[in-house]
Amino acid sequence: MPKMKKLLFTTLPSNDLGLLTRSLPIATKLAERGHQVAFCNVAKAPRKLIADAGFENLVPRHPLYYLQTEDLNPRGLYRILSSERVKRDCGNIFNFFRELVGSVPTRFASPTSEIWNADHAGAMVGMLNENFVRAHCEAMLALINDYGPDTVVDFWNPFACVATRATGTPLVTVVQADAHPASQGLIWWKEPPADLPTPVPVLNRVLAGYGLSPINKTEELNVGDLTLVVGIPETDPLPEIADVTYVGPILWQKDEAQLPAWFDELSQDRPVIWVYPGNPRYLPGLRTPTDSIVVVQTCTEALADEDAQVVLSTGHHPLPGEVLPLPANFQHEPYVPGLAMAERSQLMIHHGGYGSCQTGLYTGTPAVIIPTFSERESNARRVAAMGAGVFILPTENRSRRKYVSPQALRAAVRRVLSDPSFTQNARRVSEKMKTYGGATQAARLIEDFSA
């Protein structure tokens, strides 16, 4: 048995479950082999899943993280944003808040805006502000120094990667192909504008402060001393020059996980459709490019009169009040075990998140996808290219809100349910995926690297 190692798992601190569904299985395999594993994700829904899995979850000591660890009303939000430390670390309060929700030119920051690559995404979430970047890196650096891991295993958190390099700690990164510098970015099917905002100059000043080499694109931060790519070459293509190891799909479900008791009461004669929108709203009272409430709104309108049983789950996120009451053929459950749910469904409708796409492909379940921003559109296009589903792109209505025609969604659902080729193709991809090692292989590679 290899010597026990102390491992820190870091993830992008977003309030959704996608990155947790691929990090928790690896962490569980490593813990079963005797290694000490702790997480760092302070967002509300991930915190619950990490706690349910029995792992320690560390919180950086910085006011910025209170924005995610506390359920803030407007007064509490203003109190934190007005604090002297946040002003110092993030500049003017209003500039900071604007950068938090999208400090880029208007045409790049609408609720349905295209997010072209990691550079562009970084610019949209505050990384044009040097103090903002430095504050996050310093918070992660302090946490790494306090915990003292033998290895950091990162899932798309650029601040954690910078801090890990600054401490000299070995770094393993687990990424999807679109996040790798050898990829064509998140929108690979067309040429990007020439004037996209980029945080690279800001990042290079921060990197120089730690004595680290400059970068040419933000994706370079996602390359570790060992870089693992989830998925398979068909779902996550990269050129041969990329120094990566494919580990196949990695999906989370407890061994003892079960579907709710009421599931067994569903009719065997009517199809089961699982609707999963991810997080309907990331910031209360504000629209962001990643919001997926359009999935819930469109499904409730399009499927209310369909001869189908609809299970709606929201990944521990609250159900938006404006979609209530739900249609009679809908059943809402805050969280369901994804693999079990997909296996028992004839169709998935979701937001195009990477974990959702991989879940459907792994279980051989076809999909209708409403991708809510560019990374999700990339995933949806690849599912469609494999013949395992279709996708419908939201447009903007007069209020500049995301909109999908209920008639278009209804037609897509009927098409996928009635054409057996979609299920056949999903099952073909599933067979190929299951030839990879998944979480077990990833854990072995990390263990060998850390030895």
Image: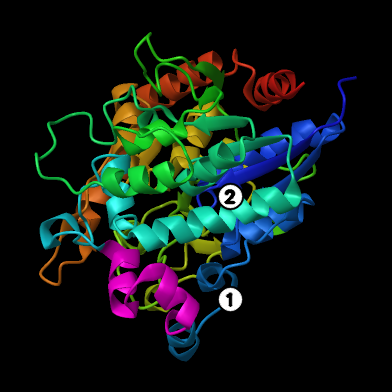
Does 263 sit left or right of 81 as displayed? right
Residue at 55 percent of width and 67 percent of height: 65
Taking the view exactly as shown, the residue that stands out farthest to the right is 1
Above or below — where is 293 with respect to 198? below
Does 100 sit left or right of 337 as displayed? left
Mark nearer the viewer, 1 or 2: 1
Q: Give the amino acid type for the residue marked by disc 2 in the picture.
A: Ser
Cα–Cα gap, marks 1 and 2: 41 Å
Looking at the picture, how far across and down is residue 252, in whole percent? 64, 40
Residue at 19 percent of width and 49 percent of height: 197
Above or below — where is 77 with respect to 278? below
| Visible residue check, residue 222 | yes
Looking at the picture, how far across and down is residue 333, in whole percent? 59, 62
Label ID, residue 267: 2
| Visible residue check, residue 417 | no
Above or below — where is 44 with respect to 83? above
* Residue nearest the observer in this picture, 188 or 376: 188
**Magenta highlight on residue 94:** yes
Q: In which quarter of the image is the N terminus?
A: top right
Residue identifier under label 1: 70
Magenta segment, which residues? 81-102
Residue at 34 percent of width and 72 percent of height: 91
**Residue 401 found in image quarter:** bottom left
**Magenta highlight on residue 134:** no
Colour mapping: rainbow
What secondary structure is found at the residue carrying circle 1? loop
Tell me if mark 1 has few (under 14), some (14-19) or many (20+) residues whose alpha carbon lies within 10 angstroms of its own. Answer: few
Does 184 sit left or right of 52 as displayed? left
* Residue nearest the observer in this picture, 349 or 308: 349
Q: In which quarter of the image is the C terminus?
A: top right
